[in-house]
Amino acid sequence: MTAPSLAPGRTGVVGTARTRLEGRAKVTGAARYAGEVPFAELAHGWVATSSVARGRIRSIDTEAVLAMPGVLAVLHHGNAPRLRPGVGLFGPDATLQVLQDDRVPHVGWPVALVVAETPEQARAAAEALVVTYDEEPHDVAFSADHPGVYTPEARPPAPPDVERGDVDAELAGSAVVVDEEYTTPEEYQSPMEPHAAVARWENGRLEAIDSNQGSYAIAQYIAQLFFLDAASVRVTSEHVGGAFGAKGVRPHLVFAVMAATMLDRPVRVVLTRRQMFTMCGLRTPTAQRIRLGADADGRLRAVDHESVSYSSAIQEFVEQSTRPTRVLYATDALRARTRLVRLDVPTPTFMRAPGWAPGSYALESAMDELAERTGLDPITLRLRNEPAVAPASGLPFSSRNLAACFEEGARRFGWPDRDPRPGVRRDGRWLVGTGVAASAHAAMTAPSTATATAEADGTFTVRIAAADIGTGARTALHQIAVDALAAPPEAVRVRIADSDFGPAQFAGGSMGTASWGWAITEAAAALRERLALADEIPADGITVRADTSELVRARQPVERHGFGAQFAEVAVDPASGEVRVRRLLGVFAVGRVVNPLTARSQLVGGMIMGLSMALHEEGVRDTASGSLVNGDLAGYHVASNADVPPIEADWVDDPDTHNPTGIKGLGEIGIVGTAAAVANAVWHATGTRQRHLPIRLDRTLTR
Amino acid sequence: MREFRYGRATGVAEAVALHAGNPEARFLGGGTNLVDLMKSGVESPELLIDVRGLPLDRIEVAGDGSLRIGATVTNSDLAAHPEVRRRYPALAQAVLAGASGQLRNMATVGGNLLQRTRCGYFYDTIQPCNKRRPGSGCPAVTGEHRNHAILGWSEHCVATHPSDMGVALAAFDAVVSVHTADGPAQLPLPDFYLPVGDTPHRETALPPGALITGVTLPPAPVAARSRYRKVRERASYAFANASIAAALDIRDGVVREVRLAFGAVASRPWRAGTAERTLTGGPATAEAFAAAADAELAAARPLTHNEYKVPLVRNLVVAMLTELAEEAAR
Ligand SMILES: Cc1cc2nc3c(=O)[nH]c(=O)nc-3n(C[C@H](O)[C@H](O)[C@H](O)COP(=O)(O)OP(=O)(O)OC[C@H]3O[C@@H](n4cnc5c(N)ncnc54)[C@H](O)[C@@H]3O)c2cc1C
Ligand code: SF4
């Protein structure tokens, strides 16, 4: 058949609201998640976890358990396959070296996997498994003045320390100084879908269906871990029910592969909610000290931000909470320091806007305190300190429309009419107040590959190992492909989440749509060039592959970020301490918005998570046992529907010519700034500062 | 989770007979607490006897004017019942303040009274806990206890009873009807829940295998002007940090009758008898309300993380009684 005619430059689908392509399949249950794809001969693995916080396994009584109904195997450090050490997505990752030795680094560390014919049998046996330990004294007590606090190694994207100008001299010369400490607690990603994987050997290839944020990288990683040829591992992740950073490579997949290999039959491993709280990472608590020095007119002379967080005994993970400070405000002198302490706790990992979310709570609370002490409006103060270049790096911004966000937001929120005095507005038993904070998040792009195929029937297929973790990524990529191919939407298929499609960026760091979209755009352009020369399309179609590695590497070094302004109105009952958010407004500058429908739900979702961070979320760790006391969703509170008020999210024009797709990514920025806006509003309502999250009722109650 | 047998009873005597002599049997109401406890390994019954088929799903006004509530009436039906709403509004409000719509559709009156504490150590089987494993110790007293008891606890256990419904029942002198192999019996709520002492695992005075058949509320005109308020860490779907059921009858500025009960402060719904006696016959002023709260809370023994409950309950008493007094004056 003849090549379809392509109208060059046809645009129109990007920028229009589209419902999710897989929406119907999801709401009808036709979409299958990793934990529910059926297989013949499927065996089920159940993880047994440690009950002590530190020590060595003395014994595992496998015999009794092997005699239980349906039990096929008990894997433990004495018999499990050896894994290649030193492997990891971001450097060696010790959290995946499961069942390799007798060491126990924290409560809830996996110590065995029981495999049985049914999940019930596996669970019964795993719970009956008797493991004894030689316990060692543990330490899980986090504080900024812990004697073990140290400076972590420099690693991208942010070195631990930045020092520009003479902070101490500028502070000494400042008319107004804010010097306060802020803390945030352990927070958990808590996606709805639990971690699940099924692994099987099929014609000499390892095939895994897994719930994760990036099938390609994970397949590579599994191959390395199990000493396999990279081409012999395939990971697919068609539908993923939320991740928020918790779904990199996790032990459930390693276990499924181990057991499928040992038993030579398909094995599924699904984690329980309680296990997710110990095996899948968390956001470390932070203790942050901020010192701001300013002239009487609010012009910043010094900004000093030190953040301490924790990591586990086995793995260094650094929460880079000073990141907002490195880009938000102009200052004569800047110091940012990131510190760490290692405890006998689970290993933290990324959680929506890592670093940015806790860091912005501290910085933007301190800015509000500076506004109070200088007698300036909080927005005026921020605009007065708008930088021409990024304060830490000295590099220009690819685009920066924070001021426009504040102006548009202030207008819509009714900010100009605000009475700045705290503690003076009553509505029945409630004290009412409003607050504002800035949002920022890195807008990075990473290399990806994509293929575009012109099929013989005149349709197109785009393949990319992207992940749709519930965000609407598949739909956005379809829109990008439709425009790039200048084809009708119904003629374009986008297939994602299959490692066989080749290297592609993770769904993480708000980099997905920008990185994948670029590769798709390149592949589509190349295909159109090929088609222009082709007389006809052969039966197996014409396929071209694009790889953006060189393009990404060749980009100019500029500071690329999304920005935003968030506004909150809260009510506080001083007699009960209850805090309720009455409305939230966020106005963002996030480059080009591909799908306003799903973009808005990402921003609103981020703001809800920010509200939840402000008022509810707190993992409570018991120092005596080292265990989490509230490791389930009855005890670990996330905002309920009744906590969520009307929320508005919108954006201003933010053309970013440094990126050919103009996309900045917006999956995380929504959570950045919400907690500070709420805390600042609570101050405005009550006159009392909230320097510790969450803003619990025992912290606001009138005694 | 252990394999268990499941049976359904259609008559009260049959249910009791099925349970008799089997310490590993449990009655199953809505299962909203029991099944969770089984999944987390706290309970591992050998036999579940489903009681929802029993003819105990009615609410009736008895000849003496008291209200008889069957043990298997769902929380939703209880809260929606016109007599409950009219005569004991605080009870309807208390039930609606608990759990979620779906849970209330399943949960029963009997199960609600017997729901277990929400202490995090109790739910986590790797932890010691005197209530779950007698004699193993109570980590909460020295550990995490922000939502634990301030009244009536012992060093053996500082957990609270989480029921909202029970708080209103306590305020209105509810009597629990039970049935054992020896026949029916009555237990007034104050005798139903046992003091903690050194046996926190023994929570009620129910004999082994006893079936709760219902709850009776004696007539209480004061209850018609009553209210329930629950303070919690999110706007719904959370257990109370403190709650209060209050009823007030004022004549000429003088308190004729008052009912006060607190939730989430003790191992049982806490009837505030001292505060009631302090107030009765005295002036209905904010000062008097505060003084009565202080009198009740004089016995409070808060710990490091739950000291806030003392001012919280005090503030709630003053706020609620003031509201009720203002309403009466209107
Ligand atoms: C997420 C969540 C949130 C919740 N929030 C709240 C809240 O805010 N406030 C609140 O008050 N409650 C709350 N609840 C608890 C809920 O109210 C109780 O789980 C429910 O009332 C228990 O009733 P049930 O019929 O389901 O009891 P079941 O779970 O069936 O049984 C509980 C216990 O009672 C026994 N039992 C049941 N019926 C009888 C009978 N007739 N005779 C003798 N023994 C019997 C059972 O053997 C078992 O020991 C919540 C529960 C959940 C899961
Ligand atoms: S307070 Fe009671 S329930 Fe909680 S750990 Fe102590 S004994 Fe167990």
Image (cartoon, coloured by chain):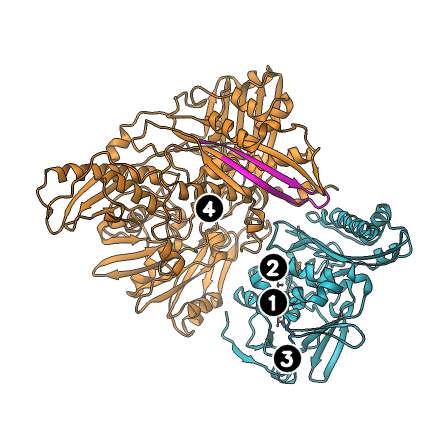
| Colour assignment, chain A | orange
Q: Secondary structure of the magenta portion, mostly?
A: strand
Q: Amino acid under label 1? A: Ala
Q: Which residue is mark 4?
A: A347
Q: Which residue is mark 1?
A: B107
Q: CA distance from mark 2 to mark 3?
A: 25 Å
Q: Amino acid under label 4? A: Thr
Q: Is residue A572 magenta?
A: yes
Q: Looking at the image, can residue A179 be seen?
A: no
Q: Answer with the quadrant where ligand 2 appears in the image.
A: bottom right
Mark 4 falls within which chain?
A: A
Q: Do the dots labelled 1 and 3 sit on one chain?
A: yes
Which structural element holds mark 3?
Answer: loop
Is the residue at mark 2 in contact range of ligand 1, meaning its CB lies under 8 Å from it? yes
Among the chains pictured, the one given cyan colouring is B
Q: Do the dots labelled 2 and 1 sit on one chain?
A: yes
Specify the farthest residue to the top. Answer: A173
Q: CA distance from mark 2 to mark 1?
A: 9 Å
Earlier in the chain: of badge 2 and badge 3, it is: 3
Q: CA distance from mark 1 to mark 3?
A: 16 Å
Q: Is residue A200 left or right of residue A101?
A: left
Can you tell which of label 1 and label 4 is closer to the viewer?
1
Q: Do the dots labelled 4 and 3 sit on one chain?
A: no
Q: Is residue A263 left or right of residue A612?
A: left
Is the residue at mark 1 in contact range of ligand 1, meaning its CB lies under 8 Å from it? yes
Which structural element holds mark 1?
Answer: loop
Verify CB contact (< 8 Å) between mark 2 and mark 1: yes
Which of the numbered marks, if any, corresponds to residue B99? 2
- Examine the image and state in which quarter residue B76 appears: bottom right
Mark 1 falls within which chain?
A: B
Residue A602 in the image, given as x and y percentages of width and height: 44, 43
